[in-house]
């Protein structure tokens, strides 16, 4: 399996990258993003772009892949709906359209979020934008597309969020998260489980195209 990974420098993407590098079925990982990863691995390559909405110069490098794991994302806090839509919907669809054209046999996996509203009729602004993004991704001619909707994600194996406020929240809430993980294991997932579940859906598929925390954990196991 050859994988393109977007957002490998973020918390979720770092966890997905780790699992891809460990999995013997993953032959190659191409990380596409704005920031260098600062690491070298035999099956890891990087493409860096200041503007990910224009991948035209790299079309030749993006052919021949079996899967794309899209882990890029921003918080909606402090953003207008138009600003959030440009980053969350427009960027994602621009990348996905290019990949669907170059790799029609590809499986596309998008990290959405618990509470995403695919009807566009209710929920908060971010939930509606994420829902439209999901719906538009399903319309593209990929072999398959899966929307991951995790709730709380526990960072493992030394991985940390690049966002300072999130690091502070994780530090404060860690004891609570650990207890919830013991009492209600399917209320929380982890960075390694997300990565393993992504690899699973490419290799074996999944019963449903939208996968919540419980489903992610089950596939990871």
Image (spheres, grey):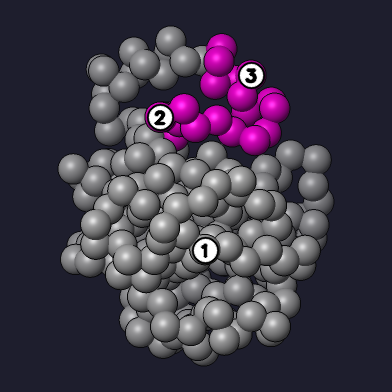
Viewer-nearest residue: 198 or 207: 198
Mark 1: which secondary structure?
A: strand
**Mark 3 sits on what residue?**
168
Q: Vertically, is 212 above or below 182? A: below
2 or 1: tag closer to the N-terminus: 1
**Mark 1 sits on what residue?**
45
Q: What span is colored magenta in the figure?
A: 153-172
Q: Vertically, is 203 above or below 80? A: below
Marks 3 and 2: in contact by CB < 8 Å?
A: no
Residue count near mark 1 (Cα–Cα under 10 Å), binned few <14, some 14–19, many ≥20: some
Marks 1 and 2: in contact by CB < 8 Å?
A: no
Image position of 129 (left or right of 5): right
Viewer-nearest residue: 12 or 75: 12
2 or 3: tag closer to the N-terminus: 2
Give me the C-alpha separation between circle 3 and circle 1.
Answer: 31 Å
Q: Quadrant of residue 162?
A: top right
**Is residue 5 covered in magenta?**
no
Q: Is residue 110 visible?
A: no
| Residue 157, label in figure | 2
- The number of discs equals 3
**Residue 130 on image: x %, y %:** 57, 58
**Residue 62 on image: x %, y %:** 53, 79
Image position of 62 (left or right of 58): left
Image position of 50 (left or right of 119): right
Give me the C-alpha separation between circle 2 and circle 3.
Answer: 18 Å
The structure residue drawn at horizontal position 26% and vertical position 18%, both measured from the top left corner, is 182
């Amino acid at each position: 399996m050859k994988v393109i990974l977007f957002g490998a420098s973020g918390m979720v993407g770092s966890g997905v990258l780790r699992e891809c590098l460990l999995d013997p079925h993953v032959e190659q990982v191409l990380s596409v993003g704005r920031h260098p990863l600062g690491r070298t691995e035999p099956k890891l390559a990087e493409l860096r772009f200041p503007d990910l909405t224009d991948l035209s110069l790299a079309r030749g490098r993006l052919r021949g892949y079996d899967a794309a794991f899209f882990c890029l994302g921003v918080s909606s806090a402090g953003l207008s709906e138009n600003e959030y839509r440009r980053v969350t919907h427009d960027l994602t669809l621009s990348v996905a359209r290019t990949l669907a054209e170059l790799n029609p046999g590809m499986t596309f996996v998008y990290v959405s979020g618990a509470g995403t509203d695919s009807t566009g009729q209710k929920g908060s602004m971010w939930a509606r934008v994420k829902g439209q993004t999901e719906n538009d991704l399903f319309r593209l001619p990929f072999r398959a597309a899966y929307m991951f909707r995790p709730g709380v994600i526990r960072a493992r194996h030394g991985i940390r969020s690049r966002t300072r406020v999130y690091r502070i929240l994780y530090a404060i809430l860690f004891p609570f998260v650990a207890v919830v993980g013991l009492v209600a294991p399917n209320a929380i997932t982890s960075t390694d489980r997300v990565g393993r579940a992504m690899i699973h859906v490419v290799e074996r598929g999944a019963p449903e195209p939208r996968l919540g925390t419980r489903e992610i954990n089950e596939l990871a196991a």
